[in-house]
């Protein structure tokens, strides 16, 4: 591997361990959830979206697994945002289930 590739890989790994990056990622997930949930037309689409966002290998699950990579002081704030995000997404999904 070239040294440029190694530098890039090292940079992206550090970026993903950065608490600010995780907060940004959760903001992106929330925006995506609002858009995608608004487009759901069937209960099956809502359930598929729930798996994509909240499932064990879903977008929020990936963020939760990364919590162990950040400092304990930042972990509290990022973890609280993750919990809030889960509640927001569940509320949106419940609303979408009622509308389809």
Image: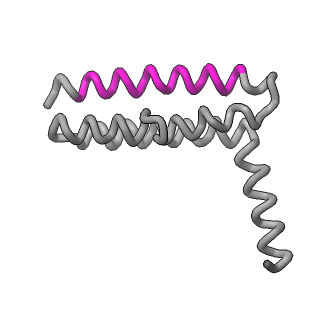
Please, what is the dominant secondary structure of the magenta stretch? Answer: helix
Q: Residue at x 81, y 59 (%)?
A: 10
Q: Residue at x 52, y 42 (%)?
A: 28
Q: Position of residue 90 (x, y in %)?
A: 37, 23
Quadrant (top left/top right/bottom left/bottom right) for the N terminus: bottom right
Quadrant (top left/top right/bottom left/bottom right) for the C terminus: top left
Q: Position of residue 32 (x, y in %)?
A: 42, 43
Tell whether 60 sits left or right of 97.
right
**Is residue 33 one of those drawn in magenta?**
no
Q: Is residue 20 above or below residue 94?
A: below
- Image quarter for residue 47? top left
- Image quarter for residue 41? top left
Tell whether 61 sits left or right of 23.
left
Residue farthest right in this picture:
3
Residue farthest bottom in this picture:
2
Residue stretch in magenta: 76-96
Q: Position of residue 55 (x, y in %)?
A: 42, 35
Tell whether 77 sits left or right of 85.
right
Colouring used for the render:
one colour
Tell whether 13 sits left or right of 85.
right
Q: Is residue 94 above or below residue 56?
A: above
**Is residue 88 one of those drawn in magenta?**
yes
- Image quarter for residue 83? top right
Camera-nearest residue between 100 and 55: 55
Q: How many marks?
A: 0
Q: Residue at x 75, y 41 (%)?
A: 18
Q: Position of residue 97 (x, y in %)?
A: 21, 26
């Amino acid at each position: 591997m070239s040294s440029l590739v190694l530098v890039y890989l090292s940079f992206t790994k550090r970026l993903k361990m950065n608490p600010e990056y995780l907060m940004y990622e959760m903001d992106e997930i929330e925006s995506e959830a609002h858009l995608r949930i608004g487009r759901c037309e069937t209960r099956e689409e809502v359930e598929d979206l729930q798996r994509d966002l909240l499932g064990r290998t879903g977008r929020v699950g990936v963020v939760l697994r990364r919590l162990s990579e950040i400092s304990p002081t930042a972990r509290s704030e990022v973890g609280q945002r993750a919990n809030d995000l889960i509640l927001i997404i569940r509320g949106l999904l419940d609303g979408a289930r009622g509308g389809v």
